[in-house]
């Protein structure tokens, strides 16, 4: 199905977005290093009669970094985008580093939000300047360098897809590669290479790292819509503690701990289960 792209100008800059499908709208807040070209999880939504609106979040793609001066300002702008598109209500689906955006949006705009789904999502302070991973990310994925970082990763993924998949595996999974083979699908290597080809960080990833510090337990407690929290038991990118914290503090929430091999819950032999859980939840809350 053809995906259409647009840009919407606000007082803070512009928002790049994509729309695909016809049906009940799902607003996707993509994860880190992504943009409005994201694809993970979309096929099942489209096949089950949902449309998908994906704004490139602040600093990603062609979206202005000023859109995300704070999480609250960012969400104000995404709400304006929905008004511009004449969309009255959406299911919010927030992925990984897009989790804080989804949480604040659902808190600030309950009248726009039918439901909230958190997939492998950050729900509290994540990486801090004291962490080695934070320091490495600041060097490799800052706006001056990230183009070359992703260019190299993409080129290596295309030439040596199996090797790069194995090298990246520990960043996604707490399992050792040899112990996860029964969970890995034959298509996972190719799909990960495709992901690496569309990944870019822009200014967005460093904005993500700073914005997680804006989240509080109070924000989680303020969410009143039906909420589905999905997280792999073996996620090494975002600790399972993020999912547990959200479940403990979001009143109408359901926690689904998945047996998928890691952070990319749309991949692996159990990915159909991931799709079924999401679709059933959205249909149950399609009022």
Image (cartoon, rainbow, N blue to C red):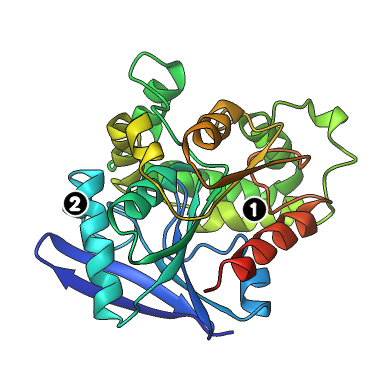
Q: Which dot marks residue 73?
A: 2
Q: Residue at x 16, y 51 (%)?
A: 66
Q: Is residue 275 above or below residue 250?
A: below
Residue 196 percent location from the top left of the image: 56, 51
Q: Is residue 6 among what the camera can see?
A: yes
Extreme left residue here?
11
Pick the quarter of the image with the N terminus: bottom right
Residue 100 percent location from the top left of the image: 38, 43
Earlier residue among tags 2 and 1: 2
Residue 13 percent location from the top left of the image: 14, 62
Which residue is nearer to you in this view: 242 or 34?
A: 242
> What residue would you read off at disc 1?
193
Extreme top residue here?
130
Quick check: 105 left or right of 31?
Answer: left
Q: Is residue 42 among what the camera can see?
A: no
Q: Measure the C-alpha gap from mark 2 to mark 1.
A: 34 Å
């Amino acid at each position: 199905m053809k995906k259409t792209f647009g840009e919407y100008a606000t007082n803070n800059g512009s928002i790049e977005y994509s729309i695909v499908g016809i049906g009940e709208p799902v607003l996707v807040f993509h994860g880190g290093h992504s943009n409005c070209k994201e694809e993970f999880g979309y096929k099942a939504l489209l096949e089950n009669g949902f449309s998908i609106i994906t704004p490139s979040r602040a600093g990603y793609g062609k979206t202005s970094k000023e859109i995300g001066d704070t999480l609250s300002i960012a969400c104000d702008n995404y709400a304006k985008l929905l008004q511009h598109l004449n969309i009255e209500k959406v299911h919010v689906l927030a992925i990984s580093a897009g989790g804080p955006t989804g949480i604040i949006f659902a808190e600030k705009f309950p009248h726009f939000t039918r439901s909230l789904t958190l997939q492998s999502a950050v729900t509290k302070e994540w990486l801090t300047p004291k962490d080695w991973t934070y320091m490495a990310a600041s060097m490799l994925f800052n706006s001056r360098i990230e183009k070359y970082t992703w260019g190299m990763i993409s080129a290596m993924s295309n030439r040596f897809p199996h090797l790069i998949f194995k090298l990246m595996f520990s960043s996604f999974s707490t399992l050792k590669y040899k112990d996860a083979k029964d969970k890995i699908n034959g298509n996972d290597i190719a799909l990960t290479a495709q992901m690496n080809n569309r990944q870019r960080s822009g200014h967005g990833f460093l904005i993500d790292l700073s914005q997680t510090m804006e989240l509080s337990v109070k924000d989680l407690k303020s969410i009143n819509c039906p909420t589905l929290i999905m997280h792999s038991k073996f996620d090494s990118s975002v600790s399972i503690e993020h999912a547990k914290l959200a479940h403990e503090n979001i009143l109408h929430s359901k926690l689904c701990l998945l047996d998928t091999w890691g952070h990319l819950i749309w991949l692996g032999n159990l990915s159909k289960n991931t799709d079924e859980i999401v679709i059933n939840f959205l249909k149950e809350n399609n009022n």
